[in-house]
Amino acid sequence: MTNFHVIDSEVSSKIIFPDVIDVQVYRTRIVERSMGAVFVKFATRNWVNNDTEVHYYEGTWQTVFEDGKYKMLRSQIKEVVDPNYSWFYE
């Protein structure tokens, strides 16, 4: 069973992430019958107390097309704690 921690999109969109040193994207796909929503799976590598920590996330980002670019509007991203092997390949 995968454990999740919900990240509040309003709060997380305003946070600066100075400890993130790397992001790896595992999956992206357009959510069918949505207006610009994208499902994502990714990991961040963070610098914490002179060491690295890896955190895994999945969920949807609602996007909006402005000024010729897609921009993030709001998210429903959850942290996945200790994902199993199949999570990386689903």
Image (cartoon, rainbow, N blue to C red):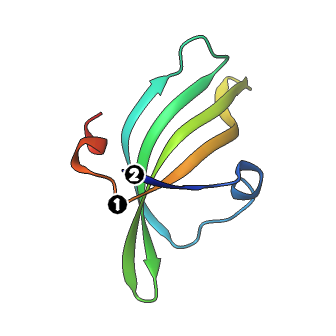
Q: Which residue is mark 1?
A: 82
Vertical arrangement, residue 33 with respect to residue 17, above or below: above
Q: Secondary structure at mark 2?
A: loop
In percent of width and height, residue 81 lies at: 41, 60
- Rendered residue at 28%/43% (across/down): 88
Kindly identify which numbered label has been placed on residue 53: none
Q: Tags 1 and 2 in contact by the CB under 8 Å rule?
A: yes
Q: Which residue is mark 2?
A: 2
- The residue closer to the viewer here, 40 or 70, is 40
Q: Furthest residue to the top? A: 33
Q: Could you tell me the amino acid type at mark 1?
A: Asp
- Discs 1/2, front: 2
The picture quadrant where one finds residue 87 is top left
In percent of width and height, residue 40 lies at: 47, 37
Q: Could you tell me the amino acid type at mark 2?
A: Thr
- The residue closer to the viewer here, 23 or 53, is 53
In percent of width and height, residue 52 lies at: 37, 77
Please tell me how many numbered marks the rendered image carries.
Answer: 2
Vertical arrangement, residue 54 with respect to residue 87, above or below: below
Residue 1 located left or right of residue 49: left
- Rendered residue at 54%/13% (across/down): 32
Q: Residues within 10 Å of mark 1 (few under 14, many from 20)?
A: some
Q: Quadrant of the C terminus?
A: top left
- Rendered residue at 67%/65% (across/down): 16
The picture quadrant where one finds residue 71 is top right
Residue 80 located left or right of residue 74: left
Q: Secondary structure at mark 1?
A: loop
Q: Mark 1 or mark 2: name the one nearer the start of the chain.
A: 2
- The residue closer to the viewer here, 17 or 40, is 40
